[in-house]
């Protein structure tokens, strides 16, 4: 149980842990590359540790040397049939991206995860991977994990994503590395493009024509990867500082890939005082410091087009909206129903418990502010982003906010409480 009390301001200079999406991808690409990959600032959150476990289960040697992770890649055809079921824990990114790699392997793998993973939709990856030639079975007529995957002999496909999802896009791209011909993936709304960027950095044959990515069989070579700070973790402190007048916070070396910076655009639209400094590029990813000064925010309208650029930040954006003057509407966000929890219902239910004026919509939510936030007991639903968003509510509440099942925070941000203590006065 995490207890959070009201504070007067947010102040300091901090760093947040490594980006979760980039950490997962660095282990997976390194595992199928030739030679060694050294990963710096890898996120030691439970989800990324699950990716390490799964790749070890596929016969890859992965070692921790001080702060670095070293992966001894075996090349494109160097994975081995696992002796046991692979378990991704709570990580959707692990099961979906790894399924793309497993579709390229002639051996059998059975892959599963925790109760949340076993409820999340897998047909979105199984359908295109089957079209490429992989044999994938699962519960509910092949739609739910555990999944069994037997691949090999893949053929390239030309696929338009029916939902905007970087996980589905990446699964097809990774399978495309093992397929004969040019695999094409088209997306109507741009989702995070870390797989495209990292594949290029590892020597992969990948190019983009308009909104279509084209990939073909190519050897990958081990690299040094410097993982930027996770903007999705930074978002919790960004909202706290932006909405609390008198605050002044610097978050150093955060990933500023434009496919991830929707949170900055939205907070600015809400009147927040945010600046970026010391920008540089490493491994094809933009990195920089974010400086936030607190002020009064105003409500805004968030629609479908921007959702993929801030999908994981919506729970904490709802908190910013509760503190802002006027109405905030979030629509076109149905995908939130398929995350670790149904994040629309979870945020609406829990914020209501603290007296916040919030209404559930079929594809989002509507929040009328500003609210006087009360204390009380709230639930995390075992969802790290819900737990941290509710903790940010506590910083503004007139009594203690107690979040049960808050251990799940270690899935993406094990040092969340420590960092929060460092910046609150
Ligand atoms: O590719 C990734 O690393 C991720 C993609 C997003 O999921 P979807 O692809 O399901 O939108 C996001 O919500 C998740 O936290 C990480
Ligand atoms: C949805 C998330 O992750 P995943 O899909 O990897 O479980 C998240 O981190 O918010």
Image (tube, rainbow, N blue to C red):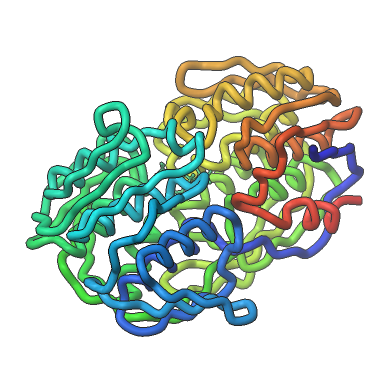
The residue depicted at 90 percent of the width and 42 percent of the height is 7
The N terminus lies in quadrant: top right
Residue 91 visible at all: yes
Viewed as shown, does residue 264 lie left or right of 136?
right
User: Residue 14 in the image: x percent, y percent?
Assistant: 75, 64
Residue 118 lies, with reference to residue 283, above or below; the image says above
Q: Is residue 50 left or right of residue 103?
A: right
Q: Is residue 213 visible?
A: no
- Depth order, front residue of 264/178: 178
Q: Residue at x 51, y 23 (%)?
A: 364
**Quadrant of residue 135 within the rendered picture:** top left
Closer to us: 43 or 323: 43
- How many marks on residues? 0
Using the rendered view, name the quadrant where residue 6 is placed.
top right
Q: Position of residue 301 (x, y in %)?
A: 54, 28
Lateral position of residue 310 relative to residue 291, left or right? left
Q: For the view shown, which residue lies furthest in the bottom direction?
A: 35
Residue drawn at 60 percent across, 39 percent down = 269
User: Is residue 89 shown above or below 140?
Assistant: below
Residue 393: x and y in percent read 77, 34
Q: Residue 328: x percent and y percent?
A: 61, 25
Can you say whether 66 is above or below 320 in the image? below
Q: Residue at x 52, y 36 (%)?
A: 340
């Amino acid at each position: 149980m995490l207890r959070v009390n009201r504070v007067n301001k947010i102040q300091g200079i901090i760093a947040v842990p490594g980006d979760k999406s980039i950490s997962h991808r660095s282990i997976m690409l390194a595992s199928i590359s030739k030679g060694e990959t050294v990963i710096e600032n890898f996120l030691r959150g439970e989800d990324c540790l699950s990716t390490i476990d799964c790749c070890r289960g596929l016969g890859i040697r992965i070692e921790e040397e001080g702060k670095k992770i070293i992966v001894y890649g075996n090349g494109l055809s160097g994975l081995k049939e696992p002796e046991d079921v692979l378990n991704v824990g709570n990580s959707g990114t692990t099961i979906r991206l790894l399924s793309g790699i497993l579709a390229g392997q002639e051996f059998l793998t059975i892959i599963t995860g925790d109760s949340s993973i076993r409820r999340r939709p897998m047909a979105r990856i199984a359908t295109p991977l089957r079209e490429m030639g992989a044999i994938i079975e699962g519960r509910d007529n092949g739609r739910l994990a555990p999944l069994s995957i037997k691949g090999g002999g893949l053929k390239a496909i030309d696929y338009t994503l029916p939902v905007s999802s970087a996980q589905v896009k990446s699964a097809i791209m990774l399978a495309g590395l093992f397929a004969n011909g040019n695999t094409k993936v088209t997306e109507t709304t741009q989702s995070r493009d870390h797989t495209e960027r990292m594949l290029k950095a590892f020597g992969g044959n990948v190019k983009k024509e308009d909104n279509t990515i084209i990939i073909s069989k190519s050897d990958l070579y081990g690299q040094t990867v410097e993982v930027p700070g996770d903007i999705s973790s930074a978002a919790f402190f960004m909202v706290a500082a932006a909405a609390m007048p008198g605050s002044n916070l610097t978050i150093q070396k955060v990933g500023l890939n434009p496919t991830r910076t929707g949170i900055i655009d939205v907070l600015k639209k809400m009147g927040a005082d945010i600046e970026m400094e010391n920008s540089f590029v490493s491994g094809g990813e933009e990195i920089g410091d974010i400086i936030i000064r607190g002020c009064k925010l105003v409500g805004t309208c968030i629609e479908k087009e921007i959702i993929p650029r801030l999908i994981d930040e919506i729970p904490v954006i709802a908190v910013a909206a509760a503190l802002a003057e006027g109405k905030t509407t979030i629509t076109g966000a149905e995908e939130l129903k398929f995350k670790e929890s149904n994040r629309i219902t979870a945020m609406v239910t829990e914020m209501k418990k603290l007296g916040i004026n919030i209404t559930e919509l079929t594809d989002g939510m509507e929040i009328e502010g500003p609210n006087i936030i009360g204390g009380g007991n709230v639930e995390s639903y075992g969802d790290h982003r819900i737990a941290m968003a509710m903790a940010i509510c506590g910083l503004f509440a007139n009594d203690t906010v107690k979040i049960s099942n808050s251990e799940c925070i270690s899935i993406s941000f094990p040092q969340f409480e420590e960092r929060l203590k460092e910046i609150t006065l």
